Image (cartoon, rainbow, N blue to C red):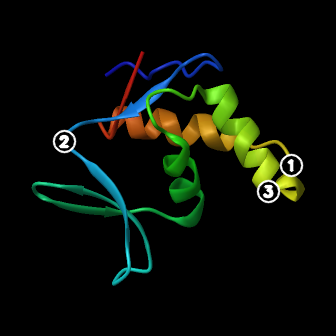
Amino acid sequence: MNTPIVTPEMTPSLNAMFRFQWEKAQNCFVLLFPEGMVKLNGGAGEIMQLIDGQTNIQQITAALHAKFPDAGDLSDDVNEFVTTAIEKKWLNHD
């Protein structure tokens, strides 16, 4: 499998086979799919909240920086998560 190249202009979207939501019982964001559920850590949940099929990687990273100004450069974290999510088929990309 080829590793996707995440660029600032890439616009990811949620794969229609998954539903992203807050799961109160798990106390975290999750991805639901017919065979089960993926529990997301806090950082992954923050990124997923911004993935809407309209917002590109650069805008997602800027929004996270505005929300967490003391976190430093989050580009690598966003790129790594999006790459993994595409590989796992959680996300599609343009």
User: Dot 2, crowdedness within 10 Å: few (<14), some or many (≥20)?
Assistant: few
Mark closer to the chain start, 3 or 2: 2
For the point 51% across and 65% down, which residue is it?
Answer: 41
Question: Which residue in the protein does label 3 denote?
Answer: 68
Circle 2 residue? 17
* 76 or 53: nearer the viewer: 53
**Circle nearer the viewer, 1 or 2:** 2
Q: Secondary structure at mark 2?
A: loop
Q: Amino acid at mark 3?
A: Phe
Q: Looking at numbered disc 2 in the image, what kind of residue is underneath it? A: Met
User: What residue is drawn where x is 60% and y is 58%?
Assistant: 43
Q: Which residue position holds label 1? A: 72
The vertical placement of 2 against 61, above or below, is above
Q: Secondary structure at mark 1?
A: loop
Does 77 sit left or right of 17 as displayed? right
Q: Residue at x 38, y 80 (%)?
A: 24
Residue 38 image-quadrant placement: bottom left
Place of residue 72 in the rendered image (x, y in percent of width and height, measured from the top left):
86, 48
Q: Give the Cα separation between the discs numbered 1 and 3.
A: 8 Å
